[in-house]
Image (cartoon, helix red, strand yellow):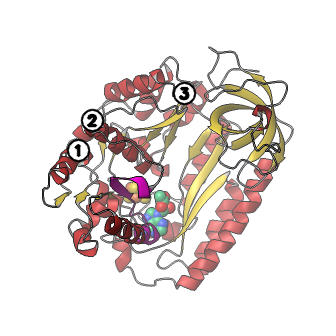
Amino acid sequence: MNVYDSERIAEGLRPLGYRMTSSPEAADLIIVNTCAIREKAEQKVFSFLGRVSGLKRKKPGLIVAVGGCVAQQEGKKILKRAPHVNVVFGTHTIPRLPQMIERIESGGYRVVDIEMSDEIEAHETATIPQDNGKTASFVTIMQGCDNYCTYCVVPYVRGREMSRTPESIIREIREIVKSGVREVTLLGQNVNSYGKKEGLCSFPELLARINEIEGLWRVRFTTSHPKDLSEDLIYAFENLDKLCKHIHLPVQSGSNRILKRMNRKYTRELYLERVEKLRAVCPGIAITSDMIVGFPGETRADFEETLELMKIVEYDGLFAFKYSDRPNAPAGRFPDKIPEEEKKERLRILLDLQEHFTIKKNQAMIGSTERVLVDGFSKKQSSGIRNPKSEIRSQDIQWTGRTSTNKIINFVQGDACNKIFTGEMIHVRIDRAFSHSLRGKPIKIEPSGLKGESYAA
Ligand code: 5AD
Ligand code: SF4
């Protein structure tokens, strides 16, 4: 969500003449878009602001703005803690940022605008990012959250749940598809309750409408709350050819006692039932999850139940976190806090177990041929691919793309496909598996016009 917001922030400042720079040192304006989800993310904000203060000493005209969830939470306290900051803007005030910057440019005093609104106007009037050569893009379909999980800061910093209209979402997707985007990831804290409050269409209906957009090849979404995962949504994986075979379904804990204390409103049994249904309807669907270890009161036995659940589900990937107290979130006041050392130990055990499943799943793909949407060059160009004049030969360029199940596949061009471009759908035979990616050989570029996920090789 922050990546998406950052794009909107950058786009909104274009009319003022701002462009991206390659380093903070080269910038006239630095915007720190912050995350408050865990304590560590928040600490990073202040250590980065410390670095920025050094830059400002060298370049006094530098404008510094802080936005996002930490800005929303801390407001003008940020100005006290970081006196070099000129602007603090909140999660609902992004559209007003250009005016705030203009005010500072013309010598105005520091500004804090973190007002929250009951309207979703911010997104309705959002500037749509222009052609930036990307294949995949995020699109926010709703903001805020009404679920109040007891550990979570989101309802306090992103406000009440609000959905955009289908028309506005579809308009935005059509625009970005025109600029070359082939895959969209629809964003919301709980996409399953899309439109309910406003009486708009349901989320599966929205997906069906998006599935019809010409020129769009793939649709993903995140995040799904297990309590609201409907039958209709499960069947969308069978019925919609562009919907990717991957669902992120955060379970957080495998213990009913802890799920109750977290206010998650589902049981371990209900969760497992839904996973089973998903796999029955869509065999081979990749399932990933979020997990919190060391929630207040989590006993060793509760933690064992989490490990047991992981063994039953065998996730394709997992994001796991040590519980941390958040301002306003009720769990901060719960007794029986778990010592840091114990949380660390539980996290290590859990990640080790997951590593085993991730590798097992990736290894099972060796020898298979996967449809891969090419994202571009791999960030990690492996050493040894340069020729003696240190020029990269085109057949040695490392490319990267993703499967429908969201696995990262790296490959070099090869003889069978000697003209690969970003944004193409290609077929890759997998020959090696690692814990975070796979490698393979491209064997065929798909003809255009046949791009839904049900297209058979
Ligand atoms: N402590 C640790 N992890 C948290 N998450 C949210 N709040 C906290 C917290 N206070 C995790 C959850 C959520 C993910 C985005 O971050 O697992 O799904
Ligand atoms: Fe936070 Fe729970 Fe809402 Fe997710 S569903 S954003 S964890 S309150």
Under mark 3, the amino acid is Arg
In the image, the residue with mark 3 has its CB under 8 Å from the nearest atom of ligand 1: no
- With respect to residue 369, does 341 lie above or below? below
Q: Quadrant of residue 367?
A: top right
- Left or right, 298 with respect to 335, comes to right
Q: How far apart are the alpha carbons under marks 2 and 1?
A: 9 Å
Q: Quadrant of residue 344?
A: bottom right
> What range is drawn magenta here?
24-44
Instruction: Name the residue carrying label 1.
Output: 98
**Marks 3 and 2: which is nearer the front?**
2
In depth, the one of 439 and 87 nearer the eye is 87
- With respect to residue 416, does 405 lie above or below? below
Q: Earlier in the sequence, mark 2 or mark 1?
A: 2
Secondary structure of the residue carrying tag 2 is helix
Q: How far apart are the alpha carbons under marks 1 and 3?
A: 30 Å
- Left or right, 85 with respect to 377, comes to left
Q: How many marks?
A: 3
Badge 1 crowding class, 10 Å Cα cut-off, few under 14, some 14 to 19, many 20 or more, is some
Instruction: Name the residue carrying label 2.
Output: 15
Instruction: Name the residue carrying label 3.
Output: 182
